[in-house]
Amino acid sequence: MKLLEERIRRDGIIRPGNVLKVDSFINHQMDITLFEEMAKEWKRRFAGKPVNKILTIEASGIGIAAIAAREFQVPVVFAKKAQSINLDADNYVTKIRSFTHGREYEVIVSRKFLGPWDHVLIIDDFLANGCALMGLLEITQMAGAAVEGIGIAVEKGFQEGGRLIRQKGIQLESLAIVESMDAETGEICFGSREGSDE
Amino acid sequence: MKLLEERIRRDGIIRPGNVLKVDSFINHQMDITLFEEMAKEWKRRFAGKPVNKILTIEASGIGIAAIAAREFQVPVVFAKKAQSINLDADNYVTKIRSFTHGREYEVIVSRKFLGPWDHVLIIDDFLANGCALMGLLEITQMAGAAVEGIGIAVEKGFQEGGRLIRQKGIQLESLAIVESMDAETGEICFGSREGSDE
């Protein structure tokens, strides 16, 4: 999606170690007008899919998911992160490892809000190694819900998450795929995988 | 706001100890259509205020803030919660105490995204003792930003947060104010403080 790529080029900050900061418009300050354009793009790419719920994970996925949900006219469920074990008959619980924060935590969704009746579109801001998404997919599986697709704002194409998801045959629509970036020159290259070309 | 009060009566769950669960439509599953009506109501109540930014706190405030921001046509900044001390020249940091989770944590906003040029509307899902809001107010003060008002979905009118905020002369618009509730009978009473009648 050209609009998002241009915005990343303009306002994204590249740090050594392949770190891309988009906190001025995506995950600390949120540009809602941009989110609306992203939501329209996902609506176009997932046209005809019987989505009845959007699933995301706290915290930075929630804003994008809310605006996307408005476009799809469906509710959002956001998975909660907990550090304490919260095994509970009322919840689906799985563990995921955060590389950013260097620790494991539980991801929790209430059984009341996800079940075999659901056709879920998963939305998140970032896809790198895919740990968070794998956790959400595990939860949809526990719930017996169908995954109609996954919409991501920024995918790091040089990390394995995208490949692992596409291998499962799930329609993954990342609106910007960063193939490479250079902290010294500030150069950033984008790729495209729209239309399941893999 | 009648629509929200009726929804709380229908789908809210009262638990002993004055606990009100609204997780089926506000803070775990999110009813975006309801959020749009709430956003319109805040737009009406804060008409004429020169709001250029919405400030909220992760995680459950983010969805409501995003939909409200769409109505106001402004960006959102969400304050981040951290458990580790993160004193940083680049951030405003304050501590708040969570009664729900029984611990203190830091609330952080980047200096890049809040400053003396900002006219802020603070949005959050719940107001009880007001600790989270006091933290956000402290951060706006550090930033030299003007607070144009505070919009809350559900205020517990029998706790002190609302009174403390209104005493500061800030326009506080809670769309549903719970005056009392009874876990045994399921009865819930709402009050009104619209139009700064205090």
Image: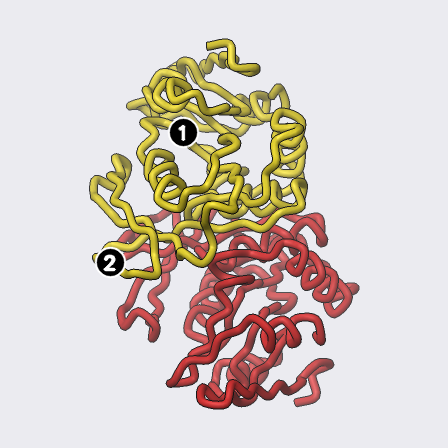
Chain colours: A red, B yellow
Residue, x 32% and y 20% (percent of image)? B160
- Crowding at dot 1, Cα within 10 Å, few <14 / some 14-19 / many 20+, comes out as many
Is A98 positioned to the left or the right of B28 in the image? left
- As rendered, which of A126 and A120 lies closer to the eye? A126
Instruction: Tell which subunit mark 2 falls on.
Output: B
Q: Is residue B24 visible?
A: no
Give the vertical position of B110 relative to B159 (above or below). below
**Residue A137 image offset from top left, x and y in percent:** 49, 68
- As rendered, which of A75 and B105 lies closer to the eye? B105
Element marked by disc 2: loop
- Label drawn at residue A60: none
Quadrant that contains the C terminus of chain A: bottom right
- CA separation in Å, label 1 and label 2: 27 Å
Give the vertical position of B197 relative to A85 (above or below). above
Q: Nearer the viewer, mark 1 or mark 2?
A: 2
* Three-letter amino acid code at the position of disc 1: Leu
Q: Is residue B95 visible?
A: yes
**Residue B48 image offset from top left, x and y in percent:** 66, 29
- As rendered, which of B131 and A148 lies closer to the eye? B131
**Residue A129 image offset from top left, x and y in percent:** 44, 80
Element marked by disc 1: strand
- Label drawn at residue B127: 1
Is A112 positioned to the left or the right of B44 in the image? left
Quadrant that contains the N terminus of chain A: bottom right
Give the residue at mark 2: B87
Residue, x 51% and y 83% (percent of image)? A164
To which quarter of the image does residue A55 belong?
A: bottom right
Residue, x 30% and y 60% (percent of image)? B89
* Three-letter amino acid code at the position of disc 2: Leu
The mark nearer the N terminus, 1 or 2, is 2
Is A67 positioned to the left or the right of B79 in the image? right
